[in-house]
Image (cartoon, rainbow, N blue to C red):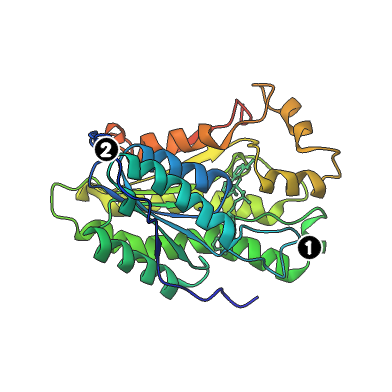
């Protein structure tokens, strides 16, 4: 599939309410989040918006011929923005949330998204790569080439593209900086999951990228970290269940010491912590949020 064409931002338009503005340390901070139409990305938009961030929610908002399940839609992306803008609006910040349609395989589209965030809100403080897909279900040597390419290009290439577009913007903030580059890896980054070889390779690549970026960013004040979720109740997990011929994604819960699937908000809470000031001592970390799956 050709990369989705980009569009201008759609900014929430809920009227400002009378409740006090968000007053925590995130007020005035600006984030761009990919994969924001649903799942972990959407939950991260909600978490950061609740913390007072301005957020540009980015998603391809359309299906991919190589990926055998539905991806997020424009309607879902718009709904996330409308819902969070309404909440932000009650704190006087309806104009803090916007959306942008971009395929993370398209570096120019991501550069345009970063430019929108900077021009609308005055800079960029966090870039969070949540966009991802899964495919497989057969041994690596039998996976159709277009599926393997899509998984590598989106799950690893998309994070590389986000870093290329966003890190210079994070570095454009004046010193002392507190920028955050964050990505969602997976328990698959450290485990050999059969029938998901390209996914495991891409997520291991994300972990390696984060470690290298952290060293490259050094003493700039900008950090790079990742979160590795375990089985989390989103559409990608339902797609994984189909790849394994499981009756339900709930079947994954038995493999996780916590004994249940995680909620997207539980992963978003860790990403929100990493985006915030309290994570200043962490860089190059790949943090499990996996109900013990990697143990
Ligand atoms: N859910 C889990 O169990 C789990 C576990 C480990 C890691 N992860 C990772 O978490 C991240 C979020 O996944 P999720 O669980 O929310 O899945 P999801 O399918 O609900 O959401 C993924 C989002 O990414 C978007 N997307 C896909 N390809 C894109 C592209 N080329 N450009 C822009 N956007 C694109 C989709 O439209 C969708 O909105 C992914 O990187 C996934 O690999 C999920």
- Residue 294 visible to an observer of this rendering: yes
**Callout 1: 10 Å neighbours few (<14), some, many (20+)?**
some
Is the residue indicated by label 2 positioned so its CB lies within 8 Å of ligand 1?
no
Classify mark 1: helix, strand or loop: loop
Residue occupying the point 86% across, 38% down? 247
Label placed on residue 18: 2
Query: What is the residue that sits farthest to the top in this orientation?
Result: 258
Residue occupying the point 45% across, 54% down? 209
Label placed on residue 26: none
Q: Which residue is mark 1?
A: 143
Instruction: Measuring from the top left, give residue 272's x and y in whole percent.
Output: 39, 38
Instruction: Measuring from the top left, give residue 59's x and y in whole percent.
Output: 52, 60
Left or right of 177 on screen, residue 95: right
Res. 84 image quadrant? top left
Left or right of 151 on screen, residue 121: left
Residue occupying the point 67% across, 66% down? 63
**Callout 2: 10 Å neighbours few (<14), some, many (20+)?**
few
Is residue 84 positioned above or below 279 on the image?
Answer: below
Left or right of 127 on screen, residue 35: right
Figure quadrant of the C terminus: top right
Query: What is the residue that sits farthest to the left in this orientation?
Result: 175
Instruction: Measuring from the top left, give residue 33's x and y in whole percent.
Output: 43, 53
């Amino acid at each position: 599939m050709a990369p989705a064409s980009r569009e201008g931002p759609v900014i929430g338009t809920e009227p400002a309410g009378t409740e006090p503005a968000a007053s925590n340390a995130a007020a005035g901070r600006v984030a761009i989040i990919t994969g924001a139409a649903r799942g972990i990305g959407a939950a991260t938009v909600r978490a950061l918006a609740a913390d007072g961030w301005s957020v540009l929610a980015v998603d391809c908002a359309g299906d991919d011929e190589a990926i055998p399940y539905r991806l997020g839609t424009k309607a879902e992306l718009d709904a996330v923005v409308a819902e969070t803008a309404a909440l932000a609006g009650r704190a006087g910040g309806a104009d803090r949330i916007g959306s942008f349609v971009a395929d993370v395989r398209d570096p120019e589209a991501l550069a345009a998204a970063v430019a929108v965030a900077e021009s609308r809100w005055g800079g960029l403080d966090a870039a969070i790569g949540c966009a991802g897909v899964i495919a497989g279900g057969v041994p690596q040597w039998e996976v159709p080439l277009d599926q393997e390419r899509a998984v590598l290009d989106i799950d690893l290439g998309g994070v590389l593209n986000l870093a290329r577009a966003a890190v210079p913007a994070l570095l454009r903030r004046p010193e002392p900086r507190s920028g955050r580059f964050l990505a969602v890896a997976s328990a698959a980054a450290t485990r050999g999951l059969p029938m998901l070889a390209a996914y495991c390779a891409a997520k291991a690549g994300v972990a390696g990228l984060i470690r290298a970026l952290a060293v490259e960013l050094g003493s700039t004040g900008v950090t790079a970290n990742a979160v590795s979720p375990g089985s989390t109740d989103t559409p990608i997990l339902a797609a994984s269940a189909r790849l394994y011929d499981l009756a339900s994604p709930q079947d994954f819960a038995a493999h996780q010491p916590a004994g249940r699937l995680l909620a997207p908000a539980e992963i978003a809470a860790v990403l929100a912590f990493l985006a915030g000031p309290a994570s200043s001592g962490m860089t190059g970390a790949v943090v499990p949020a996996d109900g013990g799956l990697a143990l």
